[in-house]
Amino acid sequence: ETANGLAINSEGMLILCQHGDRRLAVVKQLQGVSANFETLIDNYQGLLLNSPNDLTIAKDGCIFFTDPPFGFFDLKSSTFVETEMKELDFNGVYKYNPKSKEITLITNLIDLPNGIALSLNQKTLYVNKMGILDKHPKIIKIDLKTQKIETLLDGKYMAEKYQGYFDGMKVHSSGLIFTSGPGGLLIVSAQGKLMGKNDFGHITNCAFDNDEKYLYATG
């Protein structure tokens, strides 16, 4: 199963990216440490997803998620394994509508999409490009109306100086983006300006409590 990104929808149900099972799933029943899962989506046009990584849920209930190939990453050699099990020849960013059961490809132009979040007005999608392959990490912004893709923050200079990757991210009610990145936790404005950095060391994701009094980070 190997859960990765998690989110709770408006009905209080836990939605998760199951990296190992290659699907988006919902927890239907939870007893102690045991859970029953139901598949939401596990394919695009009949081809199995790679290894869903992170997700964010829009106000209308649609789920945006990233699908990099980390299920095919060999830790010993630090390389991606070529295998027939990988059915898609790209790494996508998708939108899934739970009501219509429809999946839409937003883009396949980000080589290693990871963390994902929506702007406050729900018009812009932020996606972290890890930069493991080309040593050029970025925060990408996508206009959901026009599908225009732009670089919000170029992290190449930070990656040359600090350890860490653009991984998970969250958007604060102020509109600021809190993201893992080179050097720890980065705080970025909606205009792409680096506002601050907390030296947490290498972290993988972050989340706020409901009142935004606390920020939690995983590493």
Image (cartoon, helix red, strand yellow):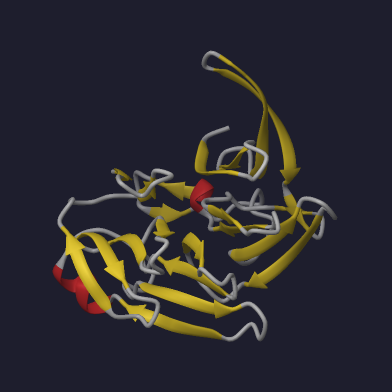
Q: 199 left or right of 118?
A: left
Q: Residue furthest front?
A: 211
Q: Is residue 59 left or right of residue 132?
A: right
For the C terminus, give its image quadrant.
top left
Q: Quadrant of residue 108?
A: bottom right
Which residue is more in the foreground, 43 or 174?
A: 174
Check the image and name the residue furthest to the right: 100
Image coordinates for residue 218, horizontal then vertical, percent: 32, 42
| Position in image of residue 198 (x %, y %) | 17, 58
Image-based side of 114 in relation to 51, left or right: left
Against 9, residue 106 (above or below) is: below
Percent across and percent down for residue 71 are 52, 46
**Which residue corresponds to the image point at 38% horizontal and 83% vertical from the top-left?**
191
Q: Residue at x 48, y 68 (%)?
A: 127
Residue drawn 52% across the image and 73% down it: 110
Of residues 104 and 74, the one drawn nearer to the viewer in this rendering: 104
Quadrant of image for the N terminus: top right
Residue that extends furthest to the top in the rendered view of this protein: 32
Q: Nearer the viewer, residue 59 or 160?
A: 59
| Residue under the point 29% across and 80% down | 193
| Residue 190 coordinates in the image, percent (x, y) | 40, 77
Corner quadrant of residue 158: bottom left
Q: Is residue 195 above or below residue 183?
A: below
